[in-house]
Image: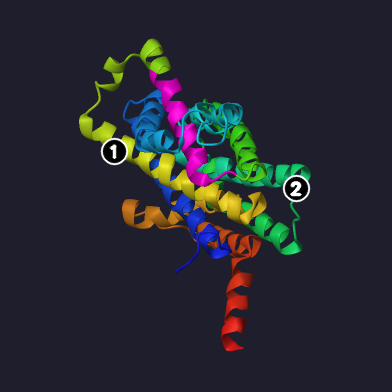
Amino acid sequence: MLPLSSATGGFLAGCVLALGAPISFAAARAGILAGMTPADLIVMRYLVAGLVLLPVLLHLGVADLVGIGWGRGAILLLTGGPVFALLQTGGYASAPLAHGGVIAPAGVTILSTAIAAAALHERLSRSHLMGAGLAVLGILLIGWEGLTAASGSRTWIGDLLFVASTVPWAVFTVLVRHWRLDAVRAITVVSVLSMAVTLPAYQVVVGASHLLSFPLHALAAQGLIQGGMQGVLATLGYTHAIRVLGVSRAVLFPAAVPAVSVLIGIPALGEIPGPMQWLGLALVTIGLLSASGVQRLILAQRRLGLS
């Protein structure tokens, strides 16, 4: 059985984010086009994620906030909770899906890697730097058409929000690694505290009647995708990858999001990638494997098997 603490286990955990985030982005954009606001989506995200993880909080201990402490918990809330979610989701109210799927992953990859190198002194090998560069170049190629297309006079606002969202998420990423936090405990704290903050605020500012005006199936779908898939599973996988692989490797999984979005679009939307997108997909894949070090691990295991 594969140990979760192994490098391969961390790689597989990161792949959960790479699969879950594109689906979440697409669902968020669809929800906004259907009349939902970013606040509606955020409430559904943390309502589901908070309720799912509330028993974990009660089991591990409320007094010391599952061992993380209330001070650190408040910082995790500010960096990985509603502020980040509001900036990222709010971007889709003004900019198309292609912009968010390109700008946010590229920004997180670059900023988190820079902070990790400066603050945590994580060593960046030549293969890592080359892999990160290939991944970012691939992201730009995949999203070039969407980024350069005329999308409306307010698109720049959404793009600015996407860029801003990378700052708190990059800080959250580095803090999880610096504090060596267990993924389950960290995401439990963020999810439950976010639920405790967003629900009363939403009720005061918007009101539950607005949310209940949408069809039940639409609310259930957003709750499962934003809260269950993205808020719990994808974020748990990413947080575990940070702890096992380190920041500079784990942040390459957000870089895979645009490539996975392209692949999901083939069967789901019948969107066949063009030559530039296929090239970008190849570069992201090669860059991710190179920077994460997985190919070296596989080769080493094969050598041991042959010896």
Q: Which residue is mark 2?
A: 117
Q: Secondary structure at mark 1?
A: helix
Span highlighted in magenta in the image: 181-199
23 relative position to 156: left or right: left
Residue type, mark 2 in image: Ala
Please say if 137 is above or below 80: below
Q: Which residue is mark 1?
A: 221
93 relative position to 301: left or right: left
Please say if 6 is above or below 155: below
Residue 220 % position (x, y): 26, 35
Which residue: 45% across, 57% down? Answer: 273
User: Distance from label 1 to label 2 (Cα)?
Assistant: 39 Å
Residue type, mark 1 in image: Ala
Q: Which mark is residue 171?
A: none
Q: Earlier in the sequence, mark 1 or mark 2?
A: 2
151 relative position to 266: left or right: right
